[in-house]
């Protein structure tokens, strides 16, 4: 490796590692694991965003929006859609306007509450989302192909255990300032 600049190589390796570059040899295992999980999540999300944009000309936010509606054939009130996506009502209104213009969703007034709107996928929206979801599933399988079924199962189980532990330790709403 003659002529290789160690400082430049270290900087390149740090960029490739992303969040993991922050970890040091003496750091606790939990910190290293957190940084590795964050790095993997960031890298996978960036790749999914790139592929959605390249393959379908759609953002991840639009994909997530359509996914919520696909799960609810009868539609969702915009307020509930906002909650499930964890975004503001203004964001949902903007996405709804765009997707309605594109013919993917339809907005109708609620029969039970004149102040509410219900959003549903159009038949075109359902077909479009199903094509995207099929491709998305393939991408996820491809991105995780480096792990065998046993490794995937173990990782899934252990992260589930972590979630249960975290949920048990969450403060109740009364404990939050």
Image: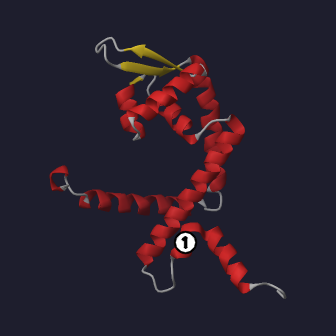
Identity of the residue drawn at 43% across and 14% down: 108
Residue 54 drawn at (x, y percent) = 71, 41
From the viewer's side, name the closer residue of 173 and 168: 173
Residue 114 drawn at (x, y percent) = 31, 13
Q: Is residue 70 visible?
A: no
Left or right, residue 46 beside residue 33: right
Residue most toward the top?
111
Colouring of the image: secondary structure
Mark 1 nearby-residue class (10 Å; few <14, some 14–19, many ≥20)? many
From the viewer's side, name the closer residue of 170 and 102: 102
Residue 119 drawn at (x, y percent) = 44, 21
The tally of labels here is: 1
State the quadrant of the N terminus.
bottom right
- From the image, tell me which residue sits under label 1: 20
Identity of the residue drawn at 38% across and 19% down: 117
State the quadrant of the C terminus.
bottom left
Residue most toward the bottom?
2
Residue most toward the left?
174
Identity of the residue drawn at 57% across and 52% down: 45
From the viewer's side, name the closer residue of 103 and 124: 103
Residue 145 drawn at (x, y percent) = 65, 57
- Check disc 1 and report its element: helix, strand or loop: helix
Q: Against 25, is 22 above or below?
A: above
Identity of the residue drawn at 56% across and 36% down: 63
């Amino acid at each position: 490796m003659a002529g290789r600049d160690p400082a430049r190589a270290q900087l390149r390796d740090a960029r490739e590692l992303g969040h993991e570059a922050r970890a040091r040899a003496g750091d606790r295992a939990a910190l290293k694991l957190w940084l590795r999980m964050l790095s993997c999540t960031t890298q996978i999300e960036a790749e999914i965003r790139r592929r959605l944009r390249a393959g379908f000309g759609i953002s991840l936010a639009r994909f997530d929006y359509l996914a919520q509606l696909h799960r609810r054939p009868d539609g969702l009130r915009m307020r509930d859609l906002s909650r499930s996506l964890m975004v503001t009502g203004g964001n949902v209104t903007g996405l709804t306007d765009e997707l309605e213009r594109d013919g993917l969703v339809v907005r109708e007034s609620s029969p039970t509450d004149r102040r509410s709107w219900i959003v549903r996928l159009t038949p075109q929206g359902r077909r479009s989302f199903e094509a995207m979801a099929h491709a998305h599933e393939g991408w996820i399988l491809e991105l995780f192909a480096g792990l065998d079924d046993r490794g995937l199962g173990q990782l899934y189980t252990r992260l589930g255990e972590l979630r249960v532990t975290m949920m048990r330790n969450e403060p109740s709403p009364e404990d939050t300032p």
